[in-house]
Amino acid sequence: MPTPTPSTTRAALLVLADGRFPAGGHAHSGGAEAAVRAGRITGAAELEEFCRGRLHTAGLVAASLAAAAALGVGPAPLDAAADARTPSPALRRVARRLGRQLMRAARATWPSAELDALADRFPKGAHQPVVLGLTARAAGLGAEDAAYCSVYESVGGPASATVRLLSLDPFDATGVLARLAPEMDLVVGRAVEAAWRAVDEGVDVLPAVSAPLLEIGAEAHGGWAVRLFAS
Amino acid sequence: MHLDHTHTHDGPSAVGADAHRPDGSRRALRIGLGGPVGSGKTATVAALCRALRDELSLAVVTNDIYTREDAEFLLREAVLPPERITAVETGACPHTAIRDDISANLEAVEDLEDEVGPLDLILVESGGDNLTATFSKGLVDAQIFVIDVAGGDDVPRKGGPGVTTADLLVVNKTDLAPYVGSDLARMAADAKAQRAELPVVLQSLRGEDGVTAVAGWVRERLAAWTA
Amino acid sequence: MTATATGGVRATARIAARADGRGGTALPVLESEGPLAVRRTRAASGDEARVMLVGAMSGPLGGDHFTVAARAGAGARLRVGSAAATLALPGQTGGGARYDVRLDVAAGAELCWLPEQLISARGSELYVSSRVDLAPGARLVLREEQVLGRAGEEPGRLTSRLTVRLGGRPLLDQELACGPGAPGGWDGPAVLAGHRALGQLVVVRPEYAESAPAARVLGECAALTPLAGPAVLVTALAADALRLRRVLDEALAVLG
């Protein structure tokens, strides 16, 4: 029976959620570069709609996986569930690469037998949200913390990338994130609730909300010769 | 990857710059090459590959800004077989990828050792970013900073972490000095003042000696590494 | 046919196909009720059975709960289409409608599930759940097309989930929520960006385990992607149903 890790060191959440945590995120735009090139993001208003859509789709899915992993649901079924929820092979590769990078940073920061076992099982990387959930456990954080970290990444990445891509005013980009905060709270709530259900009923009950343009855009982006971001 | 459980709780050396691979063998020496745009880093890497490839097993990791141009230049020049050249994408920030968040580069060097190893030497090239970009000690064992005479002969005097602390400073394109009005003697003197005992090489890849001095320095480092 | 708790119609259609032992496909079960009717039609090739879903009433309306269950047993080749698009409409009693599709394909059997579009009319509220269980060695071609609103009309609320399992393991799990009341951003630059027709084509073939078609982008808003298993998914967005069908037909032709 999986048991949640008690949340004892809330400040560890700041360490894990910090954009400077060395786990590779800085090289990725979360699909923003493809959307900018396609003319779908040209300013702060569209960035906000982009982030909102990403939050309620890929963001919710990732946060649920992370929360479930933090509750102790098995990483292998979670990883398979993540594969089934990620039709784009470009996005599956990115998720595993970022998972592997996070695994390295996490093992150096919060050594844990569970992270070692995960690295043994997935030497080329498990899906990043699964690693994130186990990292949260190793850091003494709970499912809600893991979900917060995940939803914040799901919108923070595209926002900071768009600052570079469009020379967008950084205050506007930060304003977008602040306006999304209440919706991030909602998504975290849904993710944690789904994660608790998954403890009893298995990973199939986790959300699978998709964003067709993120999947299609990722495949297009993967073929470009010149790009600022890896995804 | 560091899969060996007995080594994973040894603190920071368990990841990053651990000198050993999980199987206990000594890993390749990693040398970083940084410096401003256009100073000749990629040309120096290419010349080093040609000079060393017959005596050493080597590979290259490039960190480009927004293209894979440096990697593609090396591929086109066929300085090494393609499987020995890996391009890391940096999200337009090579200095982040070589210093602040080295996770992608560590993966690249480990994958090269796994896939084409055993390797004696891996050259990690940074995209030309700025004068302050230096490599993390968690990523490389030694670093070379490449500047050129055309970038201004006051660069050594101004200093900065690359010029002052790199294990080797290369002042490149000395053949251009007369055309751009750079004073080589002054550059050498300023570099000496900034760097105390740390070595400086003045080179022209078009000259007779080419990369010989830098290649010699790399051989010395490698001898010390494997000693 | 019975009434649901909300006063709508509950109706189920069942189709079962099996090899007839003479190189053809028999249909031992072909049952339907109320607004759902199923008919056998002439097959293009000798070993295949063709079934057409015929909507005797338009629907589903709010409160209705329709279920279609089809099973292709060992060696069977079953192709299911529909005579017309399915139109989700608001009901008089209010409340959502539900449409469940349950497909089961045995080893060595093939199911082609190629219904016409589902149109989400203004004011409607529909939850569509499609679950496909494939045995190892099963073959599948499945097309799903959703059109948000009739011409020039605002869409209703549409939530759909498509789950494909192969040998009990998840192969594809995709959910989409759009229309009034759906979580924010559904029509924004990350999700639909104003497109009113979206489609998915899933093709599962055992030989893809050895070599699956490479990922490719199909025009502006569609991509063919190999899944983490012997299958590919084509995801497409288009301005309207006609353009969407063209993209999916071209993709199917590419796959051969």
Image (cartoon, helix red, strand yellow):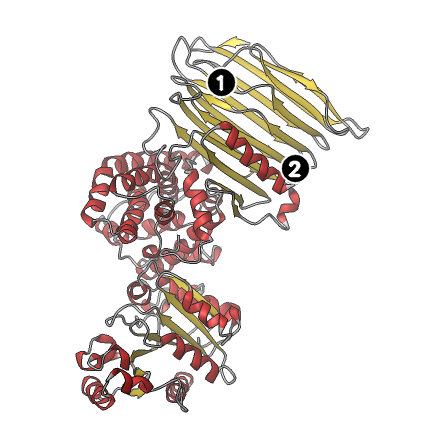
Query: Which label's residue is closer to the chain start, 1 or 2?
Result: 1
| Chain hosting mark 2 | C
Q: Callout 1: helix, strand or loop?
A: strand
Q: Quadrant of the N terminus of chain A?
A: top left
Res C138 label: 2
- The three-letter amino acid code for the residue at tag 2 is Ala
Give above or below for C212 relative to A56. Answer: below
Question: Which residue position is annotated with label 1?
Answer: C87
A104 sits to left or right of B200: right
Q: Position of residue C46 (x, y in %)?
A: 77, 28
- The three-letter amino acid code for the residue at tag 1 is Leu
Q: Position of residue A182 (x, y in %)?
A: 23, 35
For label 1, the crowd category at 10 Å Cα-Cα, with few meaning under 14, some 14 to 19 and many 20 or more, is: many
Q: CA distance from mark 1 to mark 2?
A: 31 Å
Q: Position of residue B75 (x, y in %)?
A: 49, 70
Which residue is at the front of the view, C196 or A17?
Answer: C196
Give above or below for C180 relative to C200. Answer: above
Give above or below for C232 relative to B187. Answer: above
Which residue is at the front of the view, B50 or C34?
Answer: B50
A57 sits to left or right of C72: left
Camera sees residue A62: yes
Which residue is at the front of the view, B177 or B219?
Answer: B177
Q: Residue at x 50, y 38 (%)?
A: C235
C82 sits to left or right of A229: right
Total marks shown come to 2
